[in-house]
Amino acid sequence: MSAPTNSGADFTAQKTTEELLFLARNPSLYHQSLVDSARRELQRRGQLPAPEGPAEPMLPLDGWEDEPDAVYSWPRLVLGGVATLAVAGGLWWAARGNAPAPTPAAESSGPPVLVSVETHQIPAFTAEVESDLKTLKRQLPNQERRDTTATRKYLLLARRFWTAEHQTAYFLEHLPQVAADSTLTGQAELIDQEWHRLTSVLVYNHKLRPVMTERLALMRDIAHRRMEALILLKGRYSQGLPLGGKELQATLQPVPNLLAELQGQEATIEGGQLGG
């Protein structure tokens, strides 16, 4: 659990309601004092989420790694949108009741025209992820690699990290191409799901070796920054604001050096770019 970078009412008062709700709903990701401050600010705004039901029992530590690690299918974004439109259309027609049928439009005399629609699908980065895993394993000390159980868990966690990281970097790099349409929110949500597949199991003690634990701490730091950046982007998009901003740059600025350290490189990158 990372300590907050700021404290007090001034910090939470500057946050949007969406950002405060994210803090309140994810207490395991942030310092408790920051979560409490966010809840107080939400209560002041009359936006405090309803109390949740009884907490679900913690999943057994030995079961999480059996969860399929298949990469999410990005065409789901398009198919999901089509399904939503179909349902909405059905409800609209049902609501019309006995309204008179519309006058059929005149048939077009020309051939049908196929319209190309850009969907901004994000690649799976399967080859890149495998390469990153080999590099991380090769960098482990021989003594740690001999602990096969710890190594297996470490690489499973790292796979989730690199899957989410490559997709996030691609998303941010191509942000100007998706900023003008509604695919931004959907893609940000799907990438956020990838990060949650990692952070949701980081609450467990995986009994990793020292170097593995240090690398996992770097992954956690990067994950939290990437997730916060996605929240900021969705918030600014929903408000019709430019997608940059000092707060977003400050959140992402340390990421290049953290990635360099994770990969065993010299951390000399200055002023992180939006795409990391």
Image: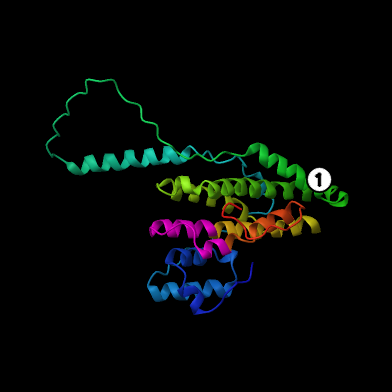
Q: Residue at the location (44% across, 60% down)?
A: 235
Residue at 57% in and 45% down: 170
- Please name the colour scheme applied to the rendered image: rainbow
Q: Within 10 Å of the Cα at label 1, are there few (<14), some (14-19), or many (20+) other Cα atoms?
A: few
Which residue is identified by label 1? 138
Nearest the camera: 94 or 84?
Answer: 84
Q: State the image coordinates of residue 199 (x, y, percent, origin top left).
A: 61, 56
Q: Say what secondary structure mark 1 lies in.
A: helix
For image coordinates 45% across by 38% down, the residue present is 119
Q: Compared with residue 50, is residue 107 higher up or lower down, i.e. above or below?
A: above
Q: Residue lying farthest left?
A: 100
Using the image as rendered, state which of residue 153 and residue 110 is in the foreground: 110
Residue 160 coordinates in the image, percent (x, y): 64, 47
Residue 147 part of the magenta segment: no
* Rendering coords of residue 116 (x, y %): 39, 31
State left or right for residue 40 relative to residue 107: right
Residue 18 spot, x, y in % from top left: 44, 63
Quarter assignment of residue 85: top left
Q: Which image quarter is the N terminus in?
A: bottom right
Q: Main secondary structure of the magenta part?
A: helix
Inspect the image, locate mark 1, and give the three-letter code of the amino acid beneath it: Arg
For residue 34, which quarter of the picture?
Answer: bottom right
**Start-end of magenta stretch:** 229-250
Q: Residue at x 88, y 51 (%)?
A: 143
